[in-house]
Amino acid sequence: MRDRGTTLRKGRREVMKTRPTQARRKGQRRDTAAVGIDFGGTFVKMGLVDSGGRILERRQFATSEASDPDSWLERVKDETRVLLQASEKHGLRVVGVGAGVPGQVDYDRGFVHGLV
């Protein structure tokens, strides 16, 4: 990218002047997608993203809408189903799910500190 003039030198590191072009990994199919889930403090935001990085569908709800952890998790599952159905509508196959959480994850107890 340096050859194309799309980076700037700033101190010791290079900084992008513009957004990088979308790139696909070698062998990555065009008919695939992923679901992303952002568990925030006030909202849960979700999206369906194609292999080119385009957001095709968005879903969100306030964390306060769910009265307890079980109903909150049920809402996440319902919205995920909506995104999976949307992937079929777009002719895409979901190959992964990514999630971001605002706290430490205790894998042994299946708990995220500070989430709900």
Image (cartoon, rainbow, N blue to C red):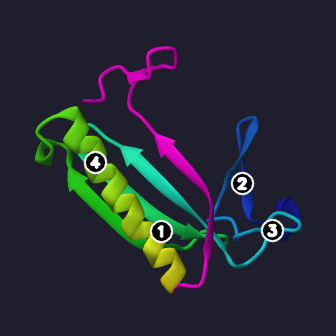
Distance of mark 3 from mark 4, alpha carbons?
32 Å
* Amino acid found under the numbered disc labelled 4: Glu
Lower sequence index among marks 2 and 4: 2
Question: What residue span does the magenta drawing correspond to?
Answer: 90-116
Mark number displayed over residue 74: 4
Q: Nearer the viewer, residue 97 or 12?
A: 97
Lower sequence index among marks 3 and 4: 3
Distance of mark 2 from mark 3, alpha carbons?
30 Å
Write down the residue under mark 2: 8
Q: Answer above or below: position of 10 versus 8.
A: above
The spot of residue 19 in percent (x, y) is 62, 65
Write down the residue under mark 1: 84
Using the rendered image of the protein, determine whether residue 42 is visible from the camera's viewpoint: no
Write down the residue under mark 3: 28
Q: Answer above or below: position of 47 versus 102.
A: below
Distance of mark 4 from mark 1, alpha carbons?
15 Å
Q: Quadrant of residue 32?
A: bottom right
Q: Residues within 10 Å of mark 4 (few under 14, many from 20)?
A: few
* Amino acid found under the numbered disc labelled 3: Gln
Count of marks placed on residues = 4
